[in-house]
Amino acid sequence: MNIFIKSYAYYVLLLIVLTLMNFFAVETNAFSDSRAFSFFSGLAMLFALKFTQTFLLTQTNFPKLDKAMMRLMILLGIGAGLGFFTGYQLIVKSLVVMEMVLAAMMLLAGYWSWRRNYRPAGYFLLAFGVPLTSAGISGLIYGMIPHHLLIELNSKLGTIWLMLFLSLALADHLNQLKTQVESRATQLAEVNERLKASQRRFQQELALASEIQQSLLPSPRPNWANLDVICFTSTASEVGGDFYAYYAFEAKKPEYEDASTVYALPSYALAVGDISGKGVSAALLMSACLAQFNMSFSQTLTPSERMAYLDKAIMPYTEPHHLNCGLCYVEITPFSSQVGSHGGIVRAINADGIPPYIRSKDGQVKRLDIGGFALGEGLGAESGYQQTTLTLNSGDIIVMISDGVVESQNTHDEKFGFERLTQAIAEASATSATDMLAHLIATVTEFMDYAEPHDDLTFVVVKL
């Protein structure tokens, strides 16, 4: 459509110049003055060439001819300027010769376009053929017969003929553009429908992938008699890289075991994992981490040994894609003493995750100061993992989260942060793990307001 507008603009300019030529030639006989002839004929030829270039797309279809036209336009501009300011007859005659060259170029471009089945080129040939031929004849016999008679003929009949068929050419060109636009619109509609169908299939496949991923996770509430546990995870998109895991197993008894304490069997392992990256690749690595986590309990390992085992076990999955897995891991061995107290021995390791929070029965909240290399890099297995061991009493609560919780943002781009998390844990009801989880989710959701989540959210809450 932009090409049509340019063509139409040059068509209008050419029409104005030819109208002025007709007025000066017939009404005032101004072409007896070679200055006026140079000026108007130069302008007419320039606009005719520009119309030809835009209407027939010579730069794309006939690049060599287009370059020749550009050179001719430069000569026309120089000749018209010199003729207007000097009036030399030699320059005027040179313009007549350029007019014949112009006629040959335009007719050649029109013929080649017509041979390429460009229908408007036929009208173009009819529009310029008669006037250009007449102009060529007038150029050949210039000076042999009264020139003003030829000028009058070209001015009247030639202009009418030219405008008639140029109008038909532009109309036909516009009709072809309309047909092309309608054809493209139909094609775009078909492509749009195919894209919508592909998007629907993609969404269905993502929904299926999300269902499969969720099915890989264990039940959010394990059926353990000695612990009150609730788990929760929410992905920012259809699939994500966060996960929780737990396992009941027989662990090594503490070295400092005394005769007054009875340790319940089995012990319990809980973990919150966060895969670096997002989307399908993170979801696939998550499934591998879950499988290796469960497989590690086929061996009798300490928490540090288990982390070293997992660090090496998932390397074949992480190295090709430069991913890793941050994991917060807690083992709990419940106990009861002869004096009637109950609690548990807690061993915690943090492999580049968020350290666990401990809320004691009296309402105090602290975050364990432990850290280590992420799993899947091989560094933790070489340097070892720091283990923290502590004793918790009945009623104490352990809160484990992924980094998506503290990095949640509201509509003002503020992060939830560790301080708000600590305050939320302290203010929550401690009657059950479920109450604690509900309060934390509500607090984070209220903080985010209507902001879109940027990362997955995962919680594991344990009450002894």
Image: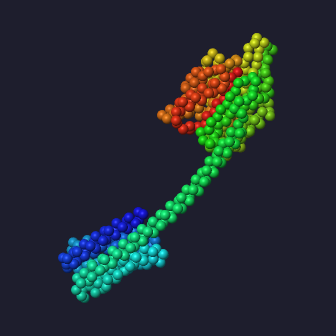
Q: Residue at x 60, y 29 (%)?
A: 441
Is there any visible trace of residue 327 in the rendered image? no
Is residue 322 depicted above or below 429 in this figure? Answer: below
Q: Residue furthest top?
A: 339
Q: Is residue 219 left or right of residue 23?
A: right
State the count of labels.
0
Q: Quadrant of residue 220?
A: top right
Q: Is residue 300 left or right of residue 38?
A: right
Q: Residue at x 58, y 21 (%)?
A: 427
Q: Residue at x 31, y 85 (%)?
A: 137
Residue 173 location, x and y as percent? 42, 70
Is there any visible trace of residue 14 in the rendered image? yes
Is residue 229 depicted above or below 18 in this figure? Answer: above
Residue 110 location, x and y as percent? 42, 76
Residue 311 location, x and y as percent? 71, 36
Image quarter hosting the N terminus: bottom left
Image quarter hosting the C terminus: top right
